[in-house]
Amino acid sequence: MSRFLQIHPEDNVVVCLEPMTKGEKISLSSGEEITLLEDVNAGHKVAIRDISENENVIKYGYAIGHATNDIKTGSWVHTHDIKTNLEGILDYKYEPNADDISAKLSRMGSKNSTFEGFVRANGKVGIRNEVWIIPTVGCVNNIATALAKVANPYVKGSVDEVVAFTHNYGCSQTGDDQEHTRTILSDLVNHPNAGGVLVLGLGCENSNIDVLKPYIGEVDESRVKFLVCQESDDEMEDGLKLLKEIIDVASNDKRETVSASNLIIGLKCGGSDGFSGITANPLVGRISDRIIENGGTSILTEVPEMFGAETILMNRCKDEATFKDTVNMINGFKEYFTKQGEPIYENPSPGNKAGGITTLEDKSLGCTQKSGDYPVMKVLEYGERTDEKGLNLLCAPGNDLCAATALASSGAQIVLFTTGRGTPFACPVPTMKIASNNVIADKKSNWIDFRAGQILEGKSFEQLTDELYDKILRTASGEKLKSEIAGFHDMAIWKRGVTL
């Protein structure tokens, strides 16, 4: 294997696949030999020709920023000599490849794999049969956690476990924040991975149970129950009684063979590094395509990490109306930043930079590869549940917990989470950690579920796509992920406004 990679023929930088030292030679496919002028860490970039001040630095075949000074051939190229090209809110033009979009639309649903899932009364399919405790307000978080602890010994049959999803909101919120809390909570109550739900309220909160019920809609009263703690003489006794009743019903649920067209996967990355856009993200993009070819759905979010690569997504929109929705999502998110008095392009994170990502364009061009090649079918508002097969775009921030919770809220039964730095968290649905490099996969084997870094060892994308897709089907059929085995479950609601 080569020790460096030129991702695209037009790139004027290469990525080091392992640490390299000053004086080492790089032999390009053109036959030219380059000498490194300084030490360079794995995942970082080296100039393969002279780059003049203000000239664009090219990676993935696209500009990832411009040089802030003259860069000599063989130099390390990073934050000290590149600046983003991005600024302000932009005008966009829809320039699709109509023939390519038409060809891909014709292949959606052309394959038919299966998995073993739980078919719910409304036709939705769950990949887990958990009992969830959903607090309406953060004031009852500790009661929810305590109830889950005392109820789990009563789990039986096909019920996986009782899980409490605590959060900080449900009261003292205004405007859209309050609406978003109600929407996210009602989405989770209706999620097919839950065989039953206890909605746990305090009684005096803004988003109390009576307020929340219209958002939730009609429910199976044997599976969804409500408890107002202020109205109960002993909320622990009453809560445990209700949970036992839910467990009794859900324990009889059985897995059955269903089409993979029922799968909805969330696409997320976090703690990215210089290998994320080379291994894990393009691998997940191939999985997204595979899911769509089997009639399923994928959802891409992290809007701030589309900046700089958004036109690629826009030109894959199925029609001009979807293109306009994408433009509104992108520019609307930029306006959200400016209204808060924050710079639009304050990204990447310190960990991203340490891993070799230099600018937001660099990050976004790697991040959006998780979406694969199929057309964008729909743009979802925050908290909106998808009803469209194929690739969806979801309006949510880049923050790992907020974005992954939003994916679950929109209907994803599983989230594919690529990472180069590693993270232990899990969202309300199974969260599969896919490592971009083998160093983190070896070091944090208790976190990592799949090793995309095998691509750097010579395994083909085709082979790993088959292996990862098979693992996804096994996970959907009940195989537990590392975070599930560890008992990790997290959720976070996106806060944008005033807290009273």
Image (cartoon, rainbow, N blue to C red):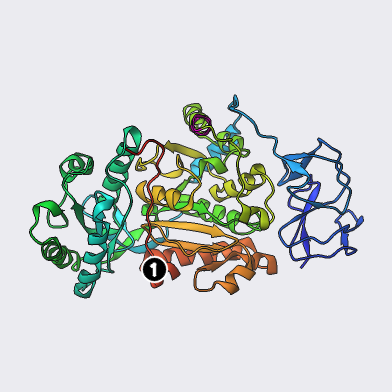
Q: Which residue is mark 1?
A: 484
Decide which of 23, 432 is in the foreground and name it. 23
- In the rendered view, does 364 fall on the left or right side of 185? right
The image shows residue 198 at horizontal and vertical percentages of: 19, 57
Q: Is residue 212 magenta?
A: no
Residue 274 visible (yes or no): no
Q: Is residue 53 above or below residue 189?
A: above
Residue 417 left/right relative to 151: right
> Observer-nearest residue: 85 or 218?
85
Residue 462: x %, y % from top left: 60, 61
| Badge 1 element | helix
Query: What span is colored magenta in the figure?
Result: 334-340
Please rate how many residues cluster around mark 1, counting C-alpha atoms within 10 Å: few if below 14, some from 14 to 19, many from 20. some
Q: Residue furthest front?
A: 500
The residue at 54%/47% (across/down) is 371
* Residue for point 21% across, 71% down: 150
